[in-house]
Image (spheres, coloured by chain):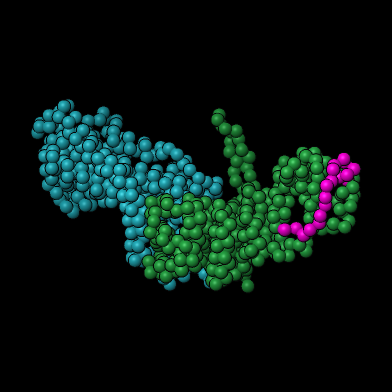
């Protein structure tokens, strides 16, 4: 007698399409949507939280600047409103990716389900990967809401190069995944407080070209902004979403994001495994 | 035939912490002290011992949730250190915590989620779970959110989750803790029948000694991280007798007197004792394998020390007494006193 006699496969842990889809469904719809929507007030307030800042920055922009073609945002042809609408829509991807994975780990610790997750034949890395899917889906909704408000109420016009946009967004997400995994590892280890998530949220807002172009930063700080993949991601998305640019103009941005992906994801996974090993040595896996 | 669970020379040491401005340093602690254990296929092995004796730590190491410091653990021949995934796929675990499901999902959704992690489809789950659900009286609750479950229902769902996986090995940590006597009996019957039907090998830790008495084919006693085998529960009476001595003196006085027993005369054998205060009297339990030789001298010692002995009876040791004696010994050892 060995292994779990489930569906004839050893423990159902194999990488078959059926297994992957089943687990993606379990993590996304059961653990993700079913739980998220069971808190209707939270779901409603989250939606409000996505949309209200768009109006806030719109009013601020009107007060501080004139969004004329003479402004420094004319590169995209639509002034500051289009600039911050795209910045806001996609910066949320990054910051919530950092927060969401970490939050996921913490709530599993608090619910006592983490031990049972890790006891299953689904590997810890796969648990992380499946957990990310729900976060990404939620942020796609946020992105659609913010871009929709921009188009419907604030006059933002999109000239979309669809393939280039999709590639840019995918790379924007995966190039930030490694750091998100590191952030969640910190929660596993430190239980409370998430220095990586907090640091990156503030850091990306300040240096990532979300609310103002990187060129506004003093010379030395501009270099700092290129240490985060979001800067390149937003450049690429703005160009492809607002100006209809193809792959060629955004190639350097894409290559930088590939570079960050290749470097940070293995680093994140290594750090996660190291942390997991450490908490299993200390006996603090399920404590919070 | 190789044992299904094979533990050799297992040590688990938890690192202490350094002193900080806000908290004192804590020393290293030895949770498992060179534990050896071999459980053959189909056997239920019961672990008894006081809280903190190392029972849960042993279960967690075998289940891969804790890493051992040294030693060897094999489950169905798979080495814990090098074949962790294979070990995990052989195991079902029921922890002693109610917190192990998603509160906002129903019973069925929770089962679908956790068994799905093992690749189990919905049809197989329904087929395997339905009889258990019906038997444990959860049919009407399965479509309700887990947060509405009583403690007993939560424990039952945990058992269903473990049993539907049909793993060859089950680890049960205090399976009937926080259950009423009726539910406890239901769970015990379930464990006995299901495990026998599937020839499952079970390692069971228990504070409720009835669990061990009813279920375990072999029993081990854990104390300060050390595991010592006890004869099977039904054979306990042959190895040990317990004198139950009622005294009219307060517990503190009885304990103070007992501490002078071994030091009083070099020829005296050490005795295992345990004291409880009940209804303004003190019940002293003394365990011995040679009551005829030891008891007269011991009673003389008590009377000579000025204690008021009210009654004495001699009987076979039961598991509860074995447990209490072990706990008392552990306590004495921890405080540096002779038991």
**Residue A148 located left or right of residue B277:** left
- Taking the spot 66% from the left edge, 62% from the top edge, the residue there is B213
- Taking the spot 84% from the left edge, 46% from the top edge, the residue there is B309
| B1 shown above or below B33 | below
Nearest to the observer: residue A213 or residue B174:
B174
**Residue B270 located left or right of residue B227:** right
- Taking the spot 61% from the left edge, 57% from the top edge, the residue there is B205
Q: Does residue A272 appear in this view?
A: no
- Taking the spot 81% from the left edge, 55% from the top edge, the residue there is B313
For the view shown, which residue lies furthest in the top direction?
A: A64
Chain the render paints cyan: A
Which picture quadrant has residue B34? bottom right
Q: Is residue B305 magenta?
A: yes
Provide residue A199's location: percent of width, then percent of height. 36, 36
Chain the render paints green: B
User: What range is drawn magenta here?
Assistant: B301-318
| B30 shown above or below A122 | above
**Residue B212 located left or right of residue A151:** right
């Amino acid at each position: 007698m060995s292994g779990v006699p489930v569906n004839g496969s050893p423990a159902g842990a194999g990488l078959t399409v059926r297994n992957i889809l089943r687990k993606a469904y379990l993590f996304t719809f059961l653990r993700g949507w079913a739980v998220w929507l069971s808190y209707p007030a939270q779901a409603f307030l989250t939606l409000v939280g996505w949309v209200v800042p768009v109006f806030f920055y719109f009013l601020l922009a009107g007060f501080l600047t004139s969004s004329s073609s003479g402004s420094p945002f004319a590169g995209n042809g639509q002034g500051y409103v289009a600039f911050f609408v795209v910045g806001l829509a996609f910066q949320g991807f990054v910051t919530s990716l950092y927060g969401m994975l970490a939050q996921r780990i913490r709530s599993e610790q608090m619910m006592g389900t983490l031990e049972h997750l890790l006891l299953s034949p689904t590997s810890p890395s796969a648990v992380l990967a499946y957990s990310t899917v729900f976060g990404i889906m939620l942020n796609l909704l946020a992105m659609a809401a913010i871009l929709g408000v921009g188009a419907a109420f604030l006059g933002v016009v999109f000239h979309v190069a669809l393939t280039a946009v999709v590639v840019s967004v995918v790379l924007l997400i995966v190039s930030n995944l490694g750091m998100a995994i590191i952030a969640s590892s910190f929660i596993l280890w430190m239980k409370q407080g998430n220095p990586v998530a907090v640091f990156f949220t503030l850091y990306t807002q300040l240096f990532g070209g979300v609310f103002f172009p990187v060129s506004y930063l003093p010379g030395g700080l501009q270099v700092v902004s290129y240490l985060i993949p979001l800067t390149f991601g937003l450049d690429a998305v703005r160009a492809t979403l607002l100006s209809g640019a193809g792959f060629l103009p955004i190639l350097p941005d894409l290559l930088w994001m590939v570079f960050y992906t290749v470097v940070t994801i293995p680093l994140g996974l290594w750090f996660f495994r190291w942390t997991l090993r450490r908490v299993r040595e200390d006996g603090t896996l399920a404590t919070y | 035939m190789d044992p299904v669970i094979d533990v050799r020379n297992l040590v688990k040491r938890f690192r202490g912490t350094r002193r900080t401005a806000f908290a004192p340093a804590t020393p290293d602690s030895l949770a498992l002290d060179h534990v050896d254990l071999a459980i053959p296929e189909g056997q239920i092995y019961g672990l008894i011992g006081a809280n903190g004796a190392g029972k849960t730590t042993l279960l967690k190491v075998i289940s891969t949730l804790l890493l051992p410091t040294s030693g060897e653990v094999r489950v169905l021949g798979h080495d814990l250190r090098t074949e962790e995934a294979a070990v995990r796929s052989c195991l079902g675990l029921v922890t002693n915590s109610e917190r192990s499901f998603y509160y906002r999902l129903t019973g069925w959704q929770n089962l679908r989620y956790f068994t799905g992690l093992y690749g189990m489809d919905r049809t197989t789950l329904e087929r395997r779970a339905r009889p258990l659900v019906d038997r444990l009286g959860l049919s009407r609750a399965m479509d309700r959110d887990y947060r509405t479950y009583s403690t007993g229902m939560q424990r039952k769902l945990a058992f269903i989750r473990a049993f539907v996986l049909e793993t060859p090995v089950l680890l049960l940590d205090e399976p009937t803790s926080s259950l009423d006597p009726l539910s406890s009996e239901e769970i015990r019957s379930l464990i006995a029948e299901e495990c026998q039907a599937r020839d499952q090998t079970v390692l069971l830790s228990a504070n409720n000694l009835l669990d061990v008495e009813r279920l375990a084919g072999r029993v081990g006693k854990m104390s300060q991280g050390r595991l010592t085998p006890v004869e099977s529960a039904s054979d306990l009476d042959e190895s040990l007798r317990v004198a139950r001595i009622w005294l009219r003196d307060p517990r503190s006085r009885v304990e103070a007197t007992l501490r002078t027993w071994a030091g009083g005369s070099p020829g005296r054998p050490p005795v295992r004792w345990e004291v409880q205060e009940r209804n303004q009297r003190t019940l002293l339990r003394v365990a011995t394998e040679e009551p005829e030789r030891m008891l007269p001298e011991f009673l003389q010692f008590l009377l000579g020390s000025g204690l008021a002995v009210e009654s004495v009876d001699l009987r076979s040791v039961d598991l509860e007494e074995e447990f209490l004696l072990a706990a008392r010994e552990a306590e004495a050892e921890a405080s540096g006193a002779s038991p």
